[in-house]
Image (cartoon, grey):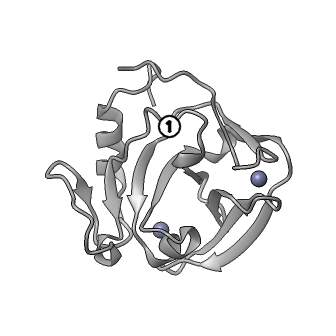
């Protein structure tokens, strides 16, 4: 408990894009929305929500793709132009946070979602645990996810 060290480092599959985050994620959740399913060609995305001001690319220049989310917000994604890996999603105008692909951290041993959003469009075979925090669509209040994630006690510093 409390032994995940900062900064968090990560990058794309080919390592042309590398990044660093100097503060703990506010929360990690799984998003089962149709955009995340399409982007990954998979069932859901593991999103680590971080303070945008504490994020920086340490190598490479990201390419950018924009779209409108299931909730109607204007969103963009940073990805590697060489290997195509999506690294982060943000919002225009900025909400002050970035959603990082938690599976792209160098060390994912500590990564664990505090809950699930857009459960209404989750694949039918996904099984949820009793203690999981579930939202049918986009949460209007993320506090339960933030609190549950903090309760995991992953980071020594208060987040
Ligand atoms: Zn790459
Ligand atoms: Zn999503």
Residue at 77 percent of width and 44 percent of height:
15
Circle 1 SS class: loop
The answer to whether 127 is drawn above or below residue 59 in the figure is: below
Q: Quadrant of the C terminus?
A: top left
The single residue placed furthest to the left in the displayed view is 130
Q: Identify the residue at horizontal 65%, vertical 61% (top origin).
A: 94
Q: Quadrant of the N terminus?
A: top left
Find residue 34 and report its horizontal and vertical position in percent. Answer: 46, 78
Q: Is residue 111 left or right of residue 22?
A: left
Q: Residue at x 53, y 72 (%)?
A: 41
Within the image, what quadrant is residue 110 found in? Answer: top left
Based on the displayed image, in which of its 4 quarters is residue 73 positioned? Answer: bottom right
Q: Which residue is mark 1?
A: 108
26 over 97 or under it: above or below: above
Q: Position of residue 77 (x, y in %)?
A: 68, 65
Residue 48 in picture, x, y percent from top left: 50, 48
Asked whether, in this view, residue 119 is left or right of residue 59, the answer is left
**How many residues crowd around disc 1 within 10 Å: few (fewer than 14), some, or many (20 or more)?**
few
């Amino acid at each position: 408990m409390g032994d995940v060290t900062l900064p968090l480092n990560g990058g794309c599959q080919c390592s042309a894009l590398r990044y660093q985050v100097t503060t703990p994620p506010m929360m990690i959740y799984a998003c089962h929305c149709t955009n995340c399913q399409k982007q990954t060609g998979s069932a859901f995305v593991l999103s680590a929500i971080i303070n945008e001001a504490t994020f920086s690319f340490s190598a490479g220049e990201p390419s950018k793709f924009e779209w409108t989310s299931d909730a109607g917000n204007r969103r963009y994604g940073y990805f590697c132009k060489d290997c195509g890996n999506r690294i982060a999603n943000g919002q225009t105008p900025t909400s002050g946070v970035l959603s990082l692909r938690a599976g792209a951290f160098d060390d994912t041993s500590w990564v664990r979602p505090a809950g699930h959003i857009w459960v209404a469009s989750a694949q039918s075979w996904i099984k949820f645990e009793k203690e999981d925090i579930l939202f049918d669509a986009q949460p209007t209040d993320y506090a339960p996810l933030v609190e549950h994630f903090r309760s995991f006690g992953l980071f020594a510093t208060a987040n």
